[in-house]
Amino acid sequence: MPEVQRKRRITRNNAADFTHWRVRRLNNFSSDNSHSHSPLHLGHDPGSIAVTSLGRVISVRGSFARVGMLATSHMPLSEMRATVGRFVSIRSGTSTIVAMITDVSCEDLPISDTYVATAGVDLLGEILSGDRPKFQRGVTNYPTIGDAVDLITAQELRTIYAPTGTDQINVGTLQQDRSVTAYVDVEEMLSKHFAVLGSTGVGKSTGVSLLLNEILVARPNLRVFLLDVHNEYGRCFGSRALVLNPRNLKLPFWLFNFEEIVDVLFGGRPGVAEELDVLAEVIPQAKALYTQYQNSDRLGLKRSDPKSVGFTVDTPVPYRLVDLISLIDERMGKLENRSSRIIYHKLISRVEAVRNDPRYGFMFDNANVGGDTMAEVISYLFRLPANGKPMTVMQLAGFPAEVVDSVVSVLCRMAFDFGLWSDGVSPMLFVCEEAHRYASADRSIGFGPTRKAISRIAKEGRKYGVYLGLITQRPAELDATIISQCNTLFSMRLANERDQALMRSAVSDAAANLLSFVPSLGTREVLAFGEGVALPTRLRFKEVPAHQLPRSEATIATVPSVSAGHDAHFVGAVLERWRGATSNRDAAPNDPMLERAPTPRSLASVEAPMLQPSQGFDPDRFSLLKKPLR
């Protein structure tokens, strides 16, 4: 350290001869080029320099340049704050190159040098001069040795971040200059997918609420579907969002494909091969039976070969569990070896156990009422028509843990398939909170069909108007193929080295060095990269109104209030709510301990689509096929 100070004293107190020679050399070099720069002016004291620029370019390598920082004793202190993360401008020909400082050092400086420090800068773009200055990414005219370097002005920042159209949303202000508004291009952000990354407690959920509310304002006709893992966004969007949970969701089991229904029946565990073979055979036949009952008279039914109907195990058409069990039982009755029947017994037991579990009521309760209700279910889930509520918030915290992956898989798959078969005429944004839970980088973790469904949206969704938004606190645990498809990244504070390494590999801009700031970002501060922003930017999300704050961001006292009343009655109320989540007592009108409700629990009571009752079918229409279980 004393050696560095000695060098600085030598630099500042040296004889003026070298200083005059250095300045004349730089000015002569600049005048030899076609660029017009302001020369360096000497004061009356030959030992002092009055410099009109911050520094000069001393080396250029591709998109990286090195700048010598000149002595700036005559510059105001506020203008001398040339530190990491600040934008600078390099005057080069007819354009102004915009660069960002990525490192500053005073080490290894020559003893008799006029530079007090050197800085590395990444070249990001350029402002083209003209009647209306315009910013463009990339550099067409590279700087040369000796070009003047200055801190960028507020007006130049406004030129860079000026809205270029109506599809711009205001998300906050620049960290370098709070007077400059940071805008994001909605079209670029949505059509090429986006991701919000950040550790717990850095304001990630608040940022997501801000982005989605601004998107709803800019695109009132865009449908948004949000997977809310922790039930924290229910109040963030007011009357513009429909909030769904297991109590008011209608998702019939027959909408699940084969892999998804197997995951439900086996509780998330791998299926038994023999039982899977039986299921794969009887499900298409159950679908064919149901179609026959709808399309023919009840008398004289003739069972046809299901292969002739054309249904597969994945065809989304209704079937009844009673038919499925009957078909399994029929095959079991044909077996002569009793030991072989155990497979069929276990399969029937699995189906009946899931059907009778009240936690799965959203799948099995009244699943066949009204016949084929797929159109109504999709209209309700994906807001077609919106009826003033273009957004759906799917609260997943109340679902059985064993079935969450399957439910997410069904929703992702139906969102993509509807966009595919509708040719993308009704665009939709599908937002996955805690995305690493559904699409883990480790293939041995999670549910394969869920990862496949999200990956399909990431790779092909933009062609069919299905856009993806990912939110995660562990990007390193997220499938790299999926996150690589997100071309706009909002990175908040990340402390884990693996997460930072993945970010470096995902960022394609020249300012990848910005990611060194990620561990030290403050709350609500974010580094924005990619197509949705003009430049890789360090910005601060603006304040979110109190009514739009996620529940996790609301102020919750760590010390319970004395007046909270945490007595036995409070505990009893919590237990009643707890048990109610795993029971169906409200749906048991024949229970003698309960009074009969005035209306049965149905979707109509919770803003569900109106499902038409069966059209004159005989209640005993399936009795011909029922066979007593042995």
Image (cartoon, grey):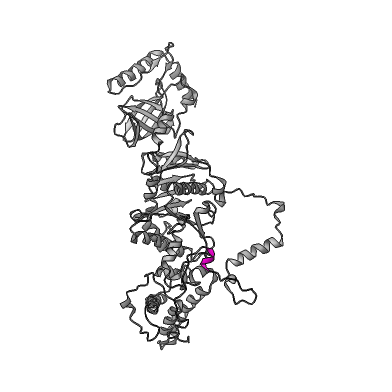
Q: Is residue 434 visible?
A: no
Report the front residue among 458 and 546. 546
Q: Residue furthest bottom?
A: 336
Percent x, y of residue 241: 50, 55
Report the front residue among 329 and 27. 329
Is 562 placed left or right of 47 in the picture? right
Residue 280 figure quarter: bottom left
Query: In the image, what residue occupies the spot 33% across and 54% down?
Result: 463
Is 493 placed left or right of 288 in the picture? right
Residue 290 figure quarter: bottom left
Q: Is residue 259 visible?
A: yes
Query: In the image, what residue occupies the spot 32% across and 76% down?
Result: 309
Report the front residue among 625 and 282. 625
Image height check: is 54 above or below 122? above
Prevalent SS, magenta region? helix
Percent x, y of residue 192: 37, 49
Is 321 placed left or right of 135 in the picture? right
Asked whether 407 falls inside the magenta stretch, the response is no
What is the magenta range? 602-606
Residue 534 figure quarter: top left
Label total for image: 0
Query: In the image, what residue occupies the spot 44% across and 45% down?
Result: 490
Report the front residue among 540 and 273. 540
